[in-house]
Image (cartoon, coloured by chain):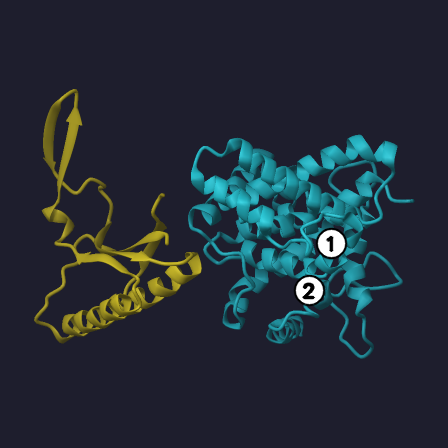
Chain colours: A cyan, B yellow
């Protein structure tokens, strides 16, 4: 097992958070649950070793923690119902969270990320808040790193993120893939966020290393996986001679998504 | 289902002269929109308001109630009317708001109700 906890966090945290937000319908609860699951992992994995499907392990653990928390805090019957719904919700098909059998469920994860990206890019949010939310929830960048990208103090950015999350929550914003007609309004924020994730990987604002290949290759690898010959080169900066990041393919979940064609077409047009 | 307030805003001096064709067109549009809301089951309540100069501000302090000539906020833009609607989520509310803005030919503001 060559993975470290840190690598698992960088690779899986955004995906787990996206899935948990779908299941829980609450951004803060999902973020807390995923953080708690990683804390448990940090305690256990040094002894047990990293499980074969660390992302699945984190997601299941986070969900169970969230259920516990809803039960613990439930003073209202609404919360009880929520916990019951989660417990019976078919996040894993057989209701038996056997970790190695979560493969089916992992298939839906890319769609969760795409859905979350477009939720964060909701036009009811200010443009900088849209991008900041994507960076926070999907790229798991720290508030400090996001503040640096926007050239604002960390406290300002923290407040901006809290307000954006609160607005989505108070307004009952739905967690769904937008209709084709809604894409143009939201695409810009999504693309800006991907660009900034790549930039952060290219010249890291924190940590010991100048580059953070976990971020830049994460963006790039999604592109390389479906790299097809004859496509135009992308407009993302190069930090590696062997391959170029491809904005179009950097968006996860397009392959399975029935609405991906209009999106792909728009992205293509935007790039040209 | 969540409730949303859709409010209509215009300049404080704005007053619709209902005898003009312009105003009659808007009234007809708003009526049509109201019917659509009612048929969809999204209607809760709606009203157009008299101009902001008709407002009175009431305060209560230590059991004493005092009144002053309004409006409360001394801003250039004032609320001219509103709808309260039932919508499944923000996107549904925003879609209704788009139709509201078209019907009254001006900007509207959408705010979710608590609870």
Say few, some or many: other residues with alpha carbon within 10 Å of mark 2 (under 14 / 14 to 19 / 20 or more). Answer: some
Viewer-side label of 1, 2: 2
Image quarter hosting the C terminus of chain A: bottom right
Q: Residue at x 10, y 33 (%)?
A: B67
Residue under label 1? A198
Q: Which mark is residue A109?
A: none
Residue B93 occupies which quadrant of the picture? bottom left
Using residue A134 as the reference point, say whether residue B113 is left or right of it: left
Which comes sooner in the sequence, label 1 or label 2?
1
SS category of the residue bearing label 1: helix
Q: Determine the image quadrant of residue B115.
A: top left
- Please report contact status of discs 1 and 2: CB closer than 8 Å, yes or no: no
Left or right of B97? Residue A197 is: right
Instruction: Look at the picture and state if B49 lies above or below A156.
Output: below
With respect to residue B2, does A35 lie above or below? above
Where residue A271 appears, as percent x and y from the top left, is 67, 71
Q: Residue at x 43, y 60 (%)?
A: B91
Judging depth in this view, the residue of A153 and B35 nearest the camera is B35
> Could one spot residue A231 in this view of the protein?
yes
- Which residue corresponds to the image point at 75% horizontal and 37% vertical from the top-left? A206
Secondary structure beneath dot 2 equals: loop
Q: Outermost residue, left direction? A: B19
Q: Which residue is mark 2?
A: A253
Q: Is residue A113 above or below residue A140?
A: below
């Amino acid at each position: 097992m060559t993975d470290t906890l840190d690598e698992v966090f960088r690779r899986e945290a955004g995906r787990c958070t996206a899935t948990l937000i779908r299941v829980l319908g609450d951004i803060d609860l999902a973020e807390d649950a995923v953080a708690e699951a990683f804390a448990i992992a940090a305690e256990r994995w040094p002894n047990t070793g990293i499980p074969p499907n660390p992302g699945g392990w984190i997601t299941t653990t986070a969900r169970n923690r969230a259920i516990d928390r809803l039960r613990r805090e439930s003073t209202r019957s609404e919360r009880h119902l929520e916990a019951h719904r989660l417990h019976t919700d078919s996040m894993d098909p057989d209701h038996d969270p056997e970790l190695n059998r979560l493969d089916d469920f992992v298939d839906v994860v890319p769609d969760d990320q795409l859905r979350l990206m477009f939720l964060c890019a909701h036009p009811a949010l200010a443009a900088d808040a849209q991008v900041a939310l994507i960076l926070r929830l999907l790229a798991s960048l720290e508030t400090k790193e996001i503040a640096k990208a926007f050239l604002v103090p960390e406290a300002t950015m923290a407040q901006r993120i809290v307000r954006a999350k609160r607005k989505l929550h108070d307004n009952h914003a739905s967690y769904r893939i937008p209709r084709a007609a809604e894409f143009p309004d939201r695409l810009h924020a999504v693309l800006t966020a991907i660009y900034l994730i790549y930039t952060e990987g290219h010249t890291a604002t924190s940590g010991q290393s100048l580059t953070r290949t976990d971020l830049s290759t994460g963006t790039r690898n999604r592109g390389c996986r479906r790299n097809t010959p004859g496509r135009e080169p992308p407009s993302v900066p190069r930090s590696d001679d062997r391959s170029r990041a491809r904005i179009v393919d950097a968006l996860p979940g397009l392959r399975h998504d029935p609405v991906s064609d209009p999106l792909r077409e728009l992205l293509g047009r935007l790039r040209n | 289902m969540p409730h949303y307030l859709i409010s209509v805003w215009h300049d404080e001096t704005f007053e619709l002269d209902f005898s003009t064709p312009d105003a009659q067109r808007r009234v007809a549009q708003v009526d049509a929109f109201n019917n659509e809301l009612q048929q969809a089951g999204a209607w809760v309540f709606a009203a157009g308001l008299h101009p902001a100069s008709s407002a009175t501000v009431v305060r209560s302090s230590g059991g004493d109630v005092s009144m002053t000539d309004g409006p409360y906020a001394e801003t250039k833009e004032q609320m001219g009317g509103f709808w309260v609607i039932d919508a499944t989520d923000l996107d549904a509310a925003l879609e209704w708001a788009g139709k509201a803005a078209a019907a009254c030919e001006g900007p509207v503001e959408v705010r979710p109700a608590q609870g």
